[in-house]
Image: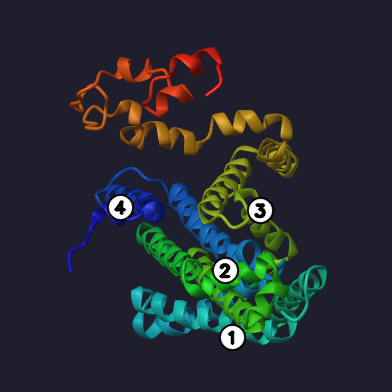
């Protein structure tokens, strides 16, 4: 079967292309001895983790339409269990790709199991009640790991985990970003994703059409929890210590802000927002040190308020419509599809051979008496009797 490239919607694969090229360029620079300092590598790892978290939460909040505040709890489960697996396997197989893959599988699966256990009773609730239950789940998970023994998960001091090689971890992290995008976008564009969006638009109508609402809610919630656990495992390999205090209520709100700021139901928006917020947090923490550290949260909140106002202010609607990425993309990339820029249009009036000049066609008098083709008689023209 011959593949017709004209029928491929390249806009569906633009995010893969951008992230893939970015990962390839940064990998070449890092592996060929290019100047990338440790802080830059750590920032790339944090951006990859944030993108996975934002895209996975977007499945629940943006496409399913349910408010979940326990995403940091699923990440916490993946971070602790994946980090524990890596710590146990380090003496035997070392801290390599094998332990990373096993940690990802176990941490993601454990978070998915927690998603099923919490989702079965919680997804029967809606709105604020579901948000309260998921928030309680996150706080319970944090408290459980915080009160464990030092021999098991480190207790209040946290779990010591082996640090993966900084030169390679960001490459694996962005490869997992591509895997997350593939899973999320293929799920949304499938018949299951259409059922999920139907539930978001009108749950009563979806149920009346025969859609198993509980089933699709549980599938979406479990898939989201799985990739949150994957992000937690990456976090454990990116740090020397995993502390439960990191995965609190504020971190769940931060992930939710990434989704809302990027646009509800927009995967590309979640990617951009996650990268932007992570970059702002990291740079503000680096620049504002000492006595200026108290201004970090103030400036961060102020920047978010400005972005939200810009995206939603009615007075700026005309400016947003005129100057945005879609307009730029249409002007630059799709310029050839604009008829005014086509030089090979065979349907133009100066190319198509005709027997009648265009000016003659436009000058024809289309009166009713001329349409019949008969000339008016002498009596008819004077209004005489027939």
Q: Residue at x 57, y 49 (%)?
A: 273
Indicate which label's residue lies in the foreground, 3 or 2.
Answer: 3
Looking at the picture, tell me which residue is in the foreground, 262 or 96.
262
Q: Which corner quadrant of the image does residue 170 belong to? A: bottom left
Residue 296 x, y percent position in the rendering? 70, 42
Neighbourhood count class around disc 1 (C-alpha, 10 Å): few under 14, some 14–19, many 20 upward:
some
Between discs 1 and 2, the one toward the N terminus: 1
Rounded to the nearest whole Å, what is the CA distance between mark 1 and mark 2?
24 Å
- Left or right of 9? Residue 152 is right
Q: Residue at x 52, y 75 (%)?
A: 192
Whether 326 is drawn above or below 42: the answer is above
Mark 1 — residue? 113
Mark 4 — residue? 24
Whether 300 is drawn above or below 350: the answer is below
Q: Residue at x 48, y 80 (%)?
A: 87
Neighbourhood count class around disc 2 (C-alpha, 10 Å): few under 14, some 14–19, many 20 upward:
some
Q: Secondary structure at mark 2?
A: strand
Residue 54 x, y percent position in the rendering? 57, 60
Between discs 3 and 2, the one toward the N terminus: 2
Query: What mark, if any, has residue 329 been given in the picture?
Result: none
**Residue 242 in view in this figure:** no
Mark 2 — residue? 241
Indicate which label's residue lies in the foreground, 4 or 2.
Answer: 4
Looking at the picture, tell me which residue is in the foreground, 131 or 105.
131
Mark 3 — residue? 260
């Amino acid at each position: 079967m011959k593949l017709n490239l004209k029928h491929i919607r390249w806009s569906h694969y633009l995010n893969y292309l951008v992230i893939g090229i970015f990962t390839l360029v940064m990998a070449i620079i890092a592996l060929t001895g290019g100047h990338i300092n440790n802080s830059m590598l750590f920032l790339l790892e944090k951006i990859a983790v944030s993108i996975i978290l934002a895209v996975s939460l977007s499945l629940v909040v943006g496409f399913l339409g349910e408010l979940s505040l326990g995403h940091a709890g699923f990440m916490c489960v993946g971070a602790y269990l994946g980090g524990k697996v890596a710590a146990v396997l380090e003496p035997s197989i070392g801290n390599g790709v094998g332990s990373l893959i096993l940690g990802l599988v176990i941490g993601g699966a454990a978070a998915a199991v927690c998603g099923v256990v919490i989702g079965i009773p919680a997804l029967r609730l809606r709105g604020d009640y579901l948000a309260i239950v998921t928030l309680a789940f996150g706080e319970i998970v944090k408290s459980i790991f915080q009160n464990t023994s030092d021999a098991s998960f480190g207790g209040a001091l946290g779990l010591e985990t082996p640090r993966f090689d900084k030169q390679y971890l960001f490459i694996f992290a962005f490869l997992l970003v591509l895997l997350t995008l593939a899973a999320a976008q293929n799920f949304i564009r499938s018949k299951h994703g259409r059922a999920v969006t139907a539930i978001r638009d009108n749950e009563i109508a979806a149920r009346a059409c025969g859609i198993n609402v509980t089933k699709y809610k549980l599938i979406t919630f479990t898939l989201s929890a799985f990739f949150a656990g994957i992000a937690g495992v990456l976090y454990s390999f990116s740090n020397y210590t995993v502390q439960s205090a990191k995965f609190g209520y504020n971190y769940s709100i931060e992930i939710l802000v990434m989704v809302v700021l990027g646009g509800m139901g927009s995967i590309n928006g979640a990617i951009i927002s996650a990268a932007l917020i992570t970059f702002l947090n990291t740079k503000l923490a680096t620049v504002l040190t000492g006595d200026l550290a108290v201004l970090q949260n103030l400036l961060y909140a102020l920047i978010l308020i400005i972005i939200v106002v810009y995206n939603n202010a009615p007075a700026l609607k005309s400016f947003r419509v005129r100057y945005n990425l879609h307009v730029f993309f249409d002007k630059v990339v799709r310029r050839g599809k604009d008829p005014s820029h086509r030089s090979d249009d065979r349907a133009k009036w100066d190319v198509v051979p005709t027997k009648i000049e265009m000016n003659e066609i436009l000058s024809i008098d289309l009166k009713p008496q001329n349409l019949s083709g008969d000339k008016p008689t002498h009596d008819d023209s004077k209004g005489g009797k027939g």
